[in-house]
């Protein structure tokens, strides 16, 4: 039963990350289009971590998640998926014009 509870907790965390990143990149697209955003959100921490690790070529960073890198890697996968999705969107939109 503990593994199911742990799996649920990890899934919920990944869903929150996915939701936060989708909202952040959506707002960035609106701002880039010249639209006003009522309350622009700050860059999510998980995105900053992803960018920092990518910039320096570091696979892990110091902290408690080093004990469970598979969870951290799942988080990084979510960030990568959302970045790929939003990077592809302008290309699809430009082709439709």
Image: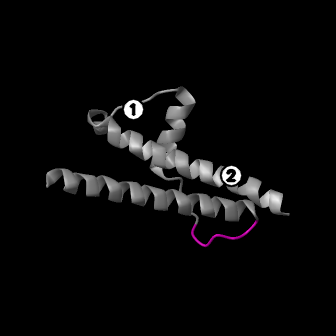
State whether residue 67 is above or below residue 30. Answer: above
Quick one: quadrant of the N terminus?
Answer: bottom left
Label 2 – label 1 distance at C-alpha: 29 Å
- Span of residues in magenta: 34-39
- Reading the image, the residue beneath label 1 is 61
The kind of secondary structure the magenta stretch mainly shows is loop
Residue 38: say if magenta.
yes
- Reading the image, the residue beneath label 2 is 88
Residue shown at 73% from the left, 59% from the top? 32
Discs 2/1, front: 2
Q: Taking 33 as reference, is 70 left or right?
A: left
Q: Taking 58 as reference, is 9 left or right?
A: left
Q: Taking 14 as reference, is 8 left or right?
A: left
Quick one: quadrant of the C terminus?
Answer: bottom right
Foreground residue among 47 and 96: 96
Identity of the residue furthest to the left in this view: 1
């Amino acid at each position: 039963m503990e593994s199911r509870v742990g799996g649920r907790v990890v899934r919920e965390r990944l869903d929150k990350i996915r939701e936060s990143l989708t909202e952040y990149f959506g707002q960035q697209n609106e701002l880039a289009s010249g639209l006003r955003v009522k309350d622009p959100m700050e860059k999510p921490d998980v995105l900053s971590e992803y960018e920092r690790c990518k910039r320096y070529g570091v696979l892990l960073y110091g902290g408690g998640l080093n004990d469970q890198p598979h969870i951290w890697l799942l988080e990084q996968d979510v960030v990568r998926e959302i970045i790929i999705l939003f990077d592809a969107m302008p290309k699809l939109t430009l082709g439709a014009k």
